Each structure stands twice: as C-alpha cells, then as structure tokens.
Amino acid sequence: MQVPLFRFTLAPHHRRLIAAIDRVVASGRFILGPEVESFEREFADYVGARHCVGVANGTEALMLSLRALGVGPGDDVVVPSFTFYASAEAVAAIGARPVFCDIDPTTFCLTPETVRSALTAHTRAIVAVHLFGYPAPVEELAEFGVPIVEDAAQATGGSGAGGRVGTLGTIAAFSFFPSKNLPCLGDGGAVTTDDPELADRVRMLRHHGSRDKTTFELVGFNSRLDALQAAVLRELLPQLDGWNAARRSAAARYRDLGLDRQVTVPSEPPAGEHVYHLYVVRHPRRDVLAEALREQGIEARSYYAQPIHRQPAMRSYAPNVALPGTEEAARSNLALPMGPELTAAESEHVVAAIERALAATTP
C-alpha cells in the first residue's frame, strides 16, 4: 500500500472551482475588485477579526505585517529558529535583525521563557509561529508589551485559549499555498488584525504604498491577492472546518491504534484546537525509521533538520546562539501521512509499519 505524506485532493470540488474561475473571467476584474473584497469580509468573519487584507503570499503577509508595525533597520524581531525559513526571511528582508529563540520540542512552538531570553533593548516585535497546526501561547506573550505577529501559515482554522488563530496577537499572517489547510490554486496570503490603522497601512503597502494609484504615501510592494485565487478561496472556505475535523479524527485514530507506544506523538494544546497541518512525531532513530517506512510505501519526511539559525544566509545573525530544544526537534522529528482523506486502512498500515520497523531495529 502506497501512502502519501499529504492525503488531500481538490478533485471533488473541481466543477465548483471551474465555475468560480469562469465567474472571474466573465467579470474582467482580475486585480483586487469584488471577489477579493468579498473574500476579505468572509475570511475576517470566519477568523473573528475586524479586518482582513488579501496579499500575494504568506511570506509577504509577514513582511507587510512587520512593515505596518513600523519595524525596519535597527530593530530586532524575536523569531523561532525551528520553522520554515520565511518566518525569519521576512524580518531580514525589511532590514531588521532576526533574533532566534528556542522552542519547546514537545509542542514545536516558542514559549514565554524562550522569548524572554531573546529580548533585547531593540526588540520591536515577536513572530509567534503556530507550527504544524499547534497554537503558540500568544496570550502569554502579552506580558512583554511587544507587538506580536502571528505566523498562522500552518494553522488556518486552529484556535488558542482566546479564540481562533489570527485574532490572538496584534496582527497575523496567513498562507494559502496549495498544501495548506485552506489552499488556493497557487500562491496567496492574507493579513488579519483588529487594528484599523494597521489594516489601512497593509492595504497601502500591498499596493505600492498608495490608496488611489495616483498619490503614493509609502514605499510599498506589489503584493495583491489575485481575484482568481480569491474566488477559489471563497468556494473552499466553507469546507475548512470539516477538513480540520477530519484531520483531528485522523490524529485521534493514530493514538487509538497505539502509535504513542512506539513514538512521541504530537501534544494536544491545553486550550483551543490543533489542526494538524502536519502530523509530526519524534523518535531518537528518526532516520532509520523514515527509511524503513519508505521501503514499505509510506512517505515520511523530517522538517527543518537544519534550523534557520544554521542556514548559510542566517548564520551571521546567530554566530553563538544555543538552542537545545530546537536541536532536539531538528534531529528527532518525522512527519507521517496526514490529511482529511487519510483512511483507517492507511492509518493502520502506517502504525503497523512503524511497529515492524522499530522491532527490527531494536538493539
């Protein structure tokens, strides 16, 4: 049995997506316009935020959020090293300095303690990444009195103690890359916030720093969500809660099958909901296990085995940083198949394969 890492397809929605695309083509409105405005209202309502601004992708959603907060050269931004490169790249790209903090390897997220050790006199923001779908403890970070940018790229539809991700911090960045929990048919992103001034600033920044195409108040970007992608997202947004519920059911089935007796399974948040963008376990013999699974037709993959602070472009920002939780997560994590369409038979095959692999490699 072949089991892919991402068990998810948009095939059942093909006709509705084609109809949405046809609607945009017939309208002739491809840049901003009514489809983008409608998606922004609908996504803001879904998240529970007062404002949503559609942008070109998740990376630029982070950049625009930081720029809207006034972050720039001479400023420090605390960001975890165990995350996708874009979380820190967005900081460096606007001239600020990423200051890397550690994570708790049981949640894969930063904590108040790891952030506290990374704060400096020049800290202007904290990037709180909801990694793999687990909600970072954003509410607890409020004690530092620093604006918090939620990197919600992997957690659309998830929630923390205070509500859905995207409403927990000062401003939030989303990605709709095709592999995400809420996908579009290419690149796409959004920024949410309750602050009308921040939302207005992001709208200008995404459109060359202008409100009206004639007066340019800021040096901005060309970072607009395409109307075609907005139309697709409007069709798929009503499916998101069902997809996330199916992901949580798949995670529970792994536990019910006894996977937690073989490997360290993902933690459940004390409040809120994990949405399992990826199902990431830990094991000290991760590489041996991954190879054994591949031999049995199961796709499994480690993530961020070289954390950001050890990437060539970022080493100058962290020449001597010690991040033991990050190093532990990097050397032991393994993503197993996950998705709304993962079947019980596939889950059973995965767990049985892990049991066989570990039994065969036990010293």
Image (cartoon, grey):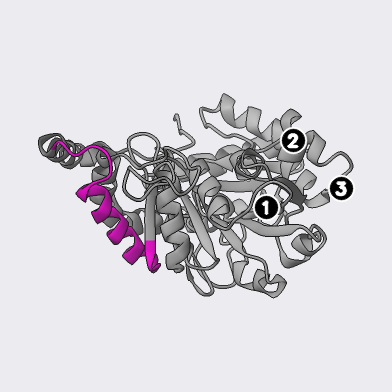
10 Å neighbourhood of mark 1: few (<14), some, or many (≥20)?
some
Residue for badge 1: 264
10 Å neighbourhood of mark 2: few (<14), some, or many (≥20)?
some
Count of numbered labels shown in the rendering: 3
The amino acid type, in three-letter code, at marker 3 is Ala
Q: Which residues are magenta?
A: 28-51
- Which mark sits nearer the N-terminus, 1 or 3? 1
* Placement of the N terminus among the 4 image quadrants: top left
Residue for badge 3: 322
Outermost residue to the top: 295
Residue for badge 2: 314
Foreground mark, 1 or 2, reads: 2
Outermost residue to the right: 320
Asked whether 29 falls inside the magenta stretch, the response is: yes
Q: Is residue 222 left or right of residue 102?
A: left
Cα distance in 3D space between marks 1 and 2: 30 Å
Asked whether 80 falls inside the magenta stretch, the response is: no
Outermost residue to the front: 215
Q: Quadrant of residue 194?
A: bottom left
Image coordinates for residue 166, horizontal then vertical, percent: 47, 62
* Placement of the C terminus among the 4 image quadrants: top right
Residue at image x 81%, y 35%? Answer: 316
Q: Give the camera-side residue of 250 and 230.
A: 230
Image coordinates for residue 249, horizontal then vertical, percent: 43, 57
